[in-house]
Image (spheres, rainbow, N blue to C red):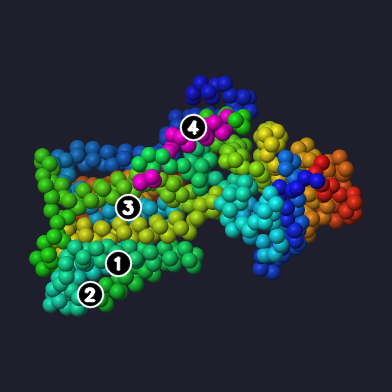
Amino acid sequence: MSEKSSSKSGAAKEFELEMTPLRRVQMTLHRYPWLSSLLVLLAVVVAFGTVNERFLLPSTISLMVQQTVIVGSLAIAQALIILTAGIDLSIGSIMIFGQMLMANLAVFVVASNVLPIAGQNPYLAMVLGVLAATAAGAVNGFLIVRFGLPPFIVTLGTWSVFMGLTLIFFKARTIQGPEMPEVMLTLGEGFSVGPFFVTYGLLVMFAMYFVVAWSLRNTAWGKHVYAVGDDPNAATLSGINTNKVLFSVYLVAGLIMGITAIITIGRVGSASPNVDPMLNLQSITAVVIGGISLFGGRGAVVGALIGSLIVVAVEMGLSLAGVDQAYRTASIGVLVIIAVGIDQWIRKVKV
Amino acid sequence: MTEPIVKARGLVKRFGSVTALNGTDFDLFPGEVLAVIGDNGAGKSSLIKCFAGAHTPDEGQMWVNGEEVVFHSTQDARRHGVETVFQTLAVAPALDIASNLFLGREERKKSFMGTVFRQLDKKGMRRKAAEHLESLGISTLQDITQAVETLSGGQRQAVSVARAAAFGSQVIILDEPTAALGVRESAKVLDLIKDLKDRGLTVVLISHNMPQVYEVADRIHVQRLGKRAAVVTPKSASMNDSVGLMTGAIDLPDTEQQLSPV
């Protein structure tokens, strides 16, 4: 306590709380919700590192970080939306739509076999793909804001819609890496830093984390995102245009999905409509494990990165330990439930 | 005669088939504390929400400082110097005290980072927030960067009042500020109201608590069935009279009402 508080009036004294060590921990975690996930990540790394020394090999670590790049990027979009107390189930589906669009636009008509304007400039193709994903995010935002529909239902709908559109427009045809202009695969390439390998896609992901985290902390928009997620009525009464904030969040999320589409083409080395149907759920898992509250208004976006790393590290650790895939999947589920339990406990800080 | 700072004539507000306001008049004079009392459903909250900008009346006219106004949002009301402390307090619990004080009107850095990247002037806002709280005598809050949800009910109320009083406002509307508070905290809030009046601000106090109303109010606006039933003063009418007016047991002729400032 500062000097100021010791000179407080009698009335103020009764506001003070008794601080038990457990309560102190709870308060600190409440203030910095990503701290608990960071501790979990460290624990996971130490545990698996001790059990199996291969876990800490630079090549293993490089691989784990690279495996984080797709979910980690999508988790930024998911984190933003969950901060507003929403949820986005369409996240993977829109990303796949974006990547299929850009890949089809970039390859020759013969290869794409659906788009007559194909075979154009690959840069233009990527820009159009990103714009399409942004527009898809805007559609989510529009439906949620204009008609007051619950985000869960809207994005459940657009998840199916964009999955369907992907099949309608682009058939189920995977466009292989060698068919595409080389520039589209750039984000899968990289360079060595000592024994570690860093891809350009990874740098893009980190850049996105930096921009979003900075904006959330340092701009009025960021404060409003938290305020809207915390209590939309209070935000409105405080003079915040709640609808505008919500729409902007879905728009930005769409943009992030579009950029992730390019990262995914680089990482996978092809554009396939069946990258991973579980991407939407994985991004939610990462966000929740990262200490961002599903009830909105609480958490830091960096938690989503830590959460993605935890999921990948647990998967990798268990796989190195020879644990069967089925058990690995189950263990991630247990992790999610524990994370939500901790979130509930932290939220109980009340006077 | 002094011109009212806020005036309304014939306000009507309907919610579906429910008529919350049925042609209410309202006069608020500069520098006074006007209490608004009324039974549940009399339209107290609907009335002040019209002035706060949270509701737009369906019919009727409103004036602030003699200028006719139509409020579509709380921002509109703020621009005319009318600030409201809602019963729910309208704070963002997870944000800190300084962020809450400046919620919806954050200040950016004057430098390149502020104009181009829209970076907030956090230090400046924290300093100003501390000054505002200090000037209102509510600097008992430990830490300006503390999340509002870690504060007690009275402290949250203080933050909300400070927010309302901090931005050059003229009129502060308080909706049931003591409803959720204990005796000692209520007393502090009443002191705060007197302090606002001493600083030359005009206060509207919505309350159910008669002793509190009689302690701080200059005039009492009695709302009944969506209309202004009477305006009295703590001297001209006893608490029993006021309750009678509220429930409709008593009718008061216009000549006995206090329609001008005290």
Q: Name the residue carrying label 2.
A: A170
Residue B59 placement, left or right of A290: right
At 73% from the left and 53% from the top, the residue drawn is B7
The first of marks 2 and 1 along the sequence is: 1
| Residue designated by label 3 | A76
Crowding around mark 2 (Cα neighbors within 10 Å: few <14, some 14 to 19, many 20+) is: many
Q: Which x, y percent locates residue A26?
A: 44, 37
State the image quarter where residue A251 is shown: bottom left
Check disc 2 and give the amino acid type: Phe
Decide which of tag 2 and tag 3 comes sooner along the chain: 3
- Which badge, 3 or 1, comes first in the chain's sequence? 3
Residue at x 66% of width, y 44% of height: B171
Mark nearer the viewer, 3 or 4: 4
Determine which residue is flagged by label 1.
Answer: A132
Residue A101: give x, y in percent of width and height: 23, 69
Quadrant assignment for the C terminus of chain A? top right
Judging from the image, mark 2 belongs to the subunit labelled A
Label 3 in the same subunit as label 1: yes
Please state the chain letter of the residue tagged with numbered disc 1 in the rendered image: A
Residue under circle 4? B127
| Chain letter, disc 4 residue | B
Q: Mark 1 and mark 3 in contact (Cβ < 8 Å)?
A: no
Q: Nearer the viewer, mark 1 or mark 4?
A: 4
Same subunit: marks 1 and 4: no
Q: Nearer the viewer, residue A73 or A182?
A: A182
State the separation of the CA atoms marked 4 and 2.
57 Å
- A252 left or right of A194 in image: right
